[in-house]
Image (cartoon, grey):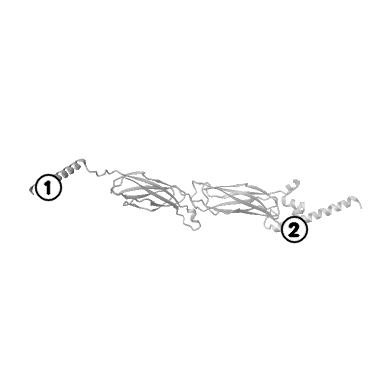
Amino acid sequence: MNKKIIITLILSTLLAASLSSTFALATEIKNESAGSSISLVTSEISLDATPKIDAPLAPSETKTIDITVKFKLNLGDLAERLFFNRRIGRLLIFGPGYILRLKGNPKAIVNLSIVECPDWCTATIEPNTMSLEIDNTFKEAKAKLTLVINSKTAQAFELKKVRIKAEFKGLGGIKESSNETSLSIRPAYIPKIAYDFQNEINITSTNETTIPINITNNGNGETLVKVEIENISENWNITIDQENVTIPINETRQVKLTTTPTRDFKNAAIKIKLTTKSTYSDTDIEEKYLKEETTSFSITLINTQPSEELPLFGILVIGIVIIILISLVAMILVRKKKQQ
């Protein structure tokens, strides 16, 4: 038989076998991806953020979360064998551009992005683009999510979400895919109060005096302030018009102390203690995060009423009267003695 004829028969057989395999691969892939007229193979992305955030985040605190991204193709048994073992299968999935590659398979490019974040938080992902091996089992890569809470705008315990998206835009005959995950975050309570009062107050003994104290809430949450007097002098009458006062953010409330001192006091100091605590009451926040804190200050009271001292003239008059009385008694005694 002519050699040319033999070679032609062999090439025809090989071509027929290749076309048969290609047709079988295309048929299975198209059956698996029914409903898509463009892509032949579906893909899947898994996205996970660990650990979850349980505790409120302090303003200006940096929190880092590990992000795990997984990617795979959804291939059946026949498609898997043809994909891994035959170049024609890879060509069908990846497209004509694969012919130019000398070795290895192209990578799946997965992009990460922040699609939702509260305005009081800054969220970044590094890296935000990753290359994953294309396989019919999950291949994974790691990224890090960094969260920073803005100390000026974050309100204590405001529950919000940070939502992250992973997206694969498709490649050749591989269909695009995406997935999302979210983290619940909330700012911690930061107590911060300012108080304004007169350090020294002139008063008169036995007269009632009212002392105003202005308390301002400069923290990031509504605050309950408990007002206490730590050193009440004996025989003094001191009262507080509000022992517990609730102060919203950036507002001021006034507390009044009323005191009546004893007659003989000179200078005295009243020591006052303020205890602050968040008013947040939901059961999902532990007591320790309400942050009870105390601060103290003193107010000095000065008696401006002069002491009631006896005048010199009065002392002289009393002395003269005493001398006269003594002289009269002495004269009476002398006369009685002479008469005897």
Q: Position of residue 103 (x, y in %)?
A: 75, 47
Q: On the image, which quarter does residue 42 sit in?
A: bottom right
Is residue 42 rendered to the left or right of residue 153? right
Q: Which residue is mark 2?
A: 78
The answer to which of 339 and 184 lies nearer the viewer is 339
Nearer the camera: disc 1 or disc 2: 1
Q: Mark on residue 33? A: none
SS assignment at label 1? helix
Point 88% across, 52% down: residue: 6
Amino acid under label 1? Leu
Within 10 Å of disc 2 (Cα), the crowding (few <14, some 14-19, many 20+) is few
Is residue 118 rendered to the left or right of residue 196? right
SS assignment at label 2? helix
Query: Label 2 near label 1: C-beta < 8 Å?
Result: no
Q: Position of residue 176 (x, y in %)?
A: 66, 52
Q: Which residue is mark 1?
A: 333
The answer to which of 122 and 21 lies nearer the viewer is 122
Q: Position of residue 72 (x, y in %)?
A: 68, 54
Amino acid under label 2? Leu
